[in-house]
Image (cartoon, rainbow, N blue to C red):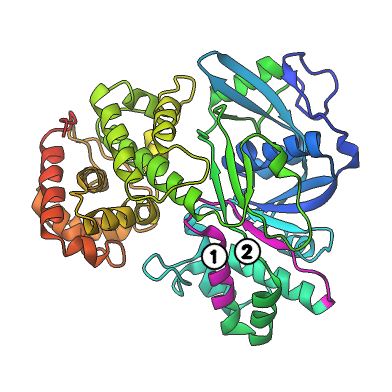
């Protein structure tokens, strides 16, 4: 049986190793949510910054729910393999900044102790949109979210991300310790501003003095992250073992492209992320973020819904359909028309680059994975730019196709009768809305347009556009072979 990846000695020569001394690292970052994106983006960026810019920025990670990744990382002394796949082949890099991992459900007091430790200067997170406990309709705190309810009732024993951040900051204030910088890396528009609003709304309900201290002293930088990261499979683990000579249960795979735009507002230092190709420290991130959400993520969602209901397992398979690939390209250009100029970016070139990334045969990104949590993703990816397009006299046709595709996906059944789970935090509401309506475009779209807080009135009140959605949904209901629009 192959040894477990636990040290950097004796690895296969095909593995690229950290170019710095791991023994000199100290815990300076605590990252909440050590999932695929952290391991394929945040940690590798920090690994590269340590190699190029020096420093001692070690990372501790914490899972707020499941233990498997944290356990694997601890069993491997924080080491894991990142595979980079493209059509020329696969390379392996062992990532080194992670020092230890925590599981909040096992030891919540231990996680709180790390949050109040002055050595921890950045608390970053990739916890997915739904974990923040925000109300998409208002952008503020969702007072019905189970974590928010629990943490407001018992602030000193938190279970959700907002509760942990607030309690950690409160303890530091009480002890006269500098605050940490909360750094959201989740795929939310203005993620730093959203996080700040949630934290301040939370503290306004429990402690006005803490509220004022955070508002005055704690920066909440926004970020834009971009790297396609499929879920790990048996092939991931097999290739990691082949290229390192060690078994690695925390291995991850990704594409060559990586980009990270960060607002440079930190209270107590940061790694030299700007020294890495794809890293950009800016005063304001919104233009880059909007570009990515609307051009990349919007097209990704469009392809995921159409692809999944059409029987395509991976985005790369969807891109083999010339009509769907052309539709994605057309949508990217429609999205580009809603954007202001983005410094340093040619949007035509960006669209072409996205098409090539989606078509990368070495990346197996499942349509079902991308399609999950649609009610959390639709507003910023598709609905907001659709409103702007209509306001400027555009037909917003590709947005109508995308929304119709989501509605068809929301039915939860393919044309051949195969049922599937609608992985969405509002799945029960969606099912209830369409349970007793005829399976037609007009009936299903009319029902889903009433889903509270999802569709803005600028869309639901636009009769020509809602009719277009209804007509396109009817086509998709009648023909799962994905007729071209």
Q: Are marks 2 and 1 in contact (CB under 8 Å)?
A: yes
Give residue 209's quadrant in the image.
bottom right
Q: Residue at x 70, y 23 (%)?
A: 247
Q: How far is the residue under mark 2 from the one under mark 1?
A: 7 Å
Where residue 116 appears, as percent x and y from the top left, is 79, 66
Give residue 353's quadrant in the image.
top left
Residue 357 showing in the rendered view? yes
Instruction: Indicate the secondary structure of the residue bearing disc 1.
Output: helix
Q: Magenta part of the protein: which range?
A: 175-201
Q: Residue at x 32, y 35 (%)?
A: 303
* In the foreground, 461 or 366: 461
Where residue 125 appears, as percent x and y from the top left, is 62, 54
Residue 199 part of the magenta-drawn span: yes
| Between discs 2 and 1, the one toward the N terminus | 1
Task: Sort mark 1 into few (<14), some (14-19) or many (20+) by Cα contacts within 10 Å.
Answer: some
Left or right: residue 201 versus residue 429 is right
* In the foreground, 478 or 37: 37
Q: Find residue 193 and name its label.
A: 1
Residue at the extreme right: 24
Q: Quadrant of the N terminus?
A: top right
Q: Find residue 262 and name its label.
A: none
Q: Residue at x 55, y 22 (%)?
A: 85
* In the foreground, 12 or 321: 321
Query: Mark 2 sits on what residue?
Result: 220
Task: Sort mark 2 into few (<14), some (14-19) or many (20+) by Cα contacts within 10 Å.
Answer: many
Give the total number of marks visible in the rendering. 2
């Amino acid at each position: 049986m192959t040894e477990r990846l636990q040290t950097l000695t004796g690895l296969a020569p095909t593995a690229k190793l950290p170019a710095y001394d791991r023994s000199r690292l100290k815990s300076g970052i605590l990252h909440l949510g050590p999932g695929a994106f952290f391991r394929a983006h945040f940690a590798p960026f920090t690994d590269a910054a340590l190699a190029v810019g020096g420093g001692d920025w070690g990372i501790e990670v914490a899972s707020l729910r499941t233990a498997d990744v944290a356990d694997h990382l601890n069993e491997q002394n924080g080491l894991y393999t990142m595979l980079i796949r493209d059509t020329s082949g696969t390379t392996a890099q062992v990532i080194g900044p992670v020092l230890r991992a925590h599981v909040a459900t096992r030891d919540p007091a231990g996680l709180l102790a790390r949050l109040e430790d002055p050595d921890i200067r950045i608390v970053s997170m990739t916890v997915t949109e739904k974990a923040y406990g925000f109300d998409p309709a208002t952008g503020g705190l969702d007072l019905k979210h189970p974590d928010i309810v629990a943490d407001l009732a018992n602030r000193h024993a938190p279970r959700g991300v907002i509760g942990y951040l607030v309690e950690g900051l409160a303890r530091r204030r009480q002890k006269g310790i500098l605050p940490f910088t909360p750094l959201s890396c989740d795929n939310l528009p203005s993620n730093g501003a959203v996080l700040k609003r949630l934290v301040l709304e939370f503290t306004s309900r429990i402690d006005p003095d803490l509220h004022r201290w955070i508002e005055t002293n704690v920066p909440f930088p926004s970020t834009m992250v971009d790297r396609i990261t499929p879920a790990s499979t048996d092939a991931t683990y097999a290739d990691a073992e082949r290229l390192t000579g060690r078994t690695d249960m925390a291995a991850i795979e990704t594409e060559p492209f990586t980009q990270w735009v960060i607002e440079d507002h930190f209270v107590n230092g940061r790694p030299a992320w700007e020294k890495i190709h794809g890293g950009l420290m800016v005063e304001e991130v919104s233009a880059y973020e909007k570009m990515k959400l609307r051009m990349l993520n919007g097209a990704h969602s469009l392809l995921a819904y159409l692809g999944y209901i059409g029987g395509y397992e991976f985005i790369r398979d969807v891109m083999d359909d010339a009509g769907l690939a052309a539709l994605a390209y057309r949508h990217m250009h429609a999205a580009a028309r809603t954007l202001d100029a983005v410094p340093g970016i040619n949007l035509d070139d960006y669209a072409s680059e996205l098409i090539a990334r989606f078509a990368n045969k070495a990346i197996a990104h499942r349509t079902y994975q991308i399609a999950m949590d649609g009610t959390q993703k639709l507003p910023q990816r598709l609905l907001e730019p659709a409103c702007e397009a209509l306001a400027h006299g555009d037909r917003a046709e590709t947005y109508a196709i995308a929304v119709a595709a989501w509605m068809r996906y929301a039915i939860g059944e393919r044309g051949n009768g195969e049922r599937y789970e609608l992985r969405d935090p509002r799945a029960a509401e969606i099912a209830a809305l369409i349970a007793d309506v005829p399976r037609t475009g007009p009936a299903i779209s009319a029902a889903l347009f009433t889903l509270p807080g999802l569709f803005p009135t600028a869309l639901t009140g636009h009769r020509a556009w809602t009719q277009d959605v209804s007509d396109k949904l009817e086509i998709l209901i009648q023909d799962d072979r994905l007729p071209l629009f």
